[in-house]
Image (cartoon, rainbow, N blue to C red):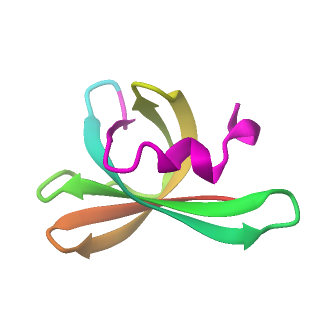
Amino acid sequence: MLESLRVESFSEHKGSGFRMLAGENLAIELTLADVTPLGNSGVREAFSLIFHAAAGAPILPQRIYRLEHDALGALDLFVVPLGPKGGAFRYEVIFT
């Protein structure tokens, strides 16, 4: 499934909500804030996804998390915390 995802797969969902599962009793609501093409990686067109978590949400370390979206379903993605900016905490996922 992940191999078939392209920048267009996410562009149409910019601004929509995702749920990041971090254990049996912890889920963080995220908003897809930005979708950025990064050029050809040699394998596919690379791209970056920036997600925003609400201020005050738990800050999670980088690792693979399950992200759920109403249209895209469940995706297991490597998520990296970037830090706070503009009142939100940012996370990034890069596809290469």
> For this rendering, which residue is in front, 52 or 9?
9
Quarter of the image for residue 46 reads bottom right
Look at the picture and state if 42 lies above or below 73. below
Residue 14 horizontal/vertical position (percent): 39, 50
Quarter of the image for residue 38 reads bottom right
Q: Name the residue at 21% across, 51% down.
A: 58
Residues drawn in magenta:
1-23
Q: Name the residue at 46% across, 44% down.
A: 12
Look at the picture and state if 64 lies above or below 68. below
Farthest right residue?
42
- The quarter in which the N terminus is drawn is top right
Q: Name the residue at 36% across, 31% down.
A: 23
- The quarter in which the C terminus is drawn is bottom right
Farthest bottom residue?
85
Residue 87 horizontal/vertical position (percent): 14, 69
Look at the picture and state if 21 lies above or below 35. above
